[in-house]
Image (cartoon, rainbow, N blue to C red):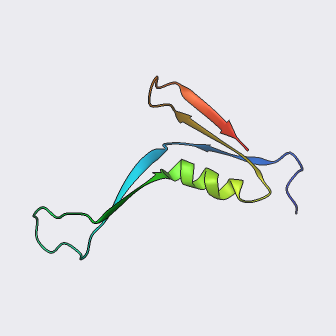
């Protein structure tokens, strides 16, 4: 059965910034290692689900708290 025309997806949860560090090798001891590259990417379960849904024809929304004022923010596509 096809979904109704106005059906959509609402994602409620955390959105984060993930700091991803690249190393030359996998650490084997608990000591300091120097990264040779770093990326900052969006993350969080609800945010990732909303991004995946936005890449489909479905209408999607994400509701999350904003870091500066901790008030809910609604982002829709």
Is 47 on the left-hand or right-hand side of 31?
right
Q: Residue at x 59, y 31 (%)?
A: 73
Question: Where residue 10 appears, x then y in whole percent?
Answer: 67, 44
State the count of labels. Answer: 0
Q: In the depicted view, which residue is nearer to us: 18 or 63?
A: 18
Quarter of the image that includes the C terminus: top right
30 in relation to 50, above or below: below
Is 24 on the left-hand or right-hand side of 38?
left
47 in relation to 56, above or below: above
Q: Residue at x 68, y 56 (%)?
A: 53
Quarter of the image that includes the N terminus: bottom right
Q: Quadrant of residue 72?
A: top right
Question: Where residue 44 appears, x then y in whole percent?
Answer: 48, 50
Is 30 on the left-hand or right-hand side of 64?
left
Q: In the depicted view, which residue is nearer to us: 29 or 45?
A: 29
Q: Residue at x 19, y 72 (%)?
A: 27
Q: In the depicted view, which residue is nearer to us: 26 or 63?
A: 26
Q: In the depicted view, which residue is nearer to us: 60 or 42?
A: 42
Question: Where residue 58 appears, x then y in whole percent?
Answer: 78, 54
Taking the view exactly as shown, the residue that stands out farthest to the front is: 36
């Amino acid at each position: 059965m096809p979904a109704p025309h106005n059906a959509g997806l609402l994602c409620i949860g955390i959105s984060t910034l993930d700091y991803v560090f690249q190393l030359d090798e996998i650490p084997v001891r608990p000591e300091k290692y120097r990264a040779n590259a770093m990326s900052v990417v969006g993350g969080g379960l609800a945010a990732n689900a909303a991004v995946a849904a936005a890449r489909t024809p479905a209408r999607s929304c994400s509701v999350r708290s904003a870091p500066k004022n901790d008030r809910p923010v609604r982002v829709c596509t």
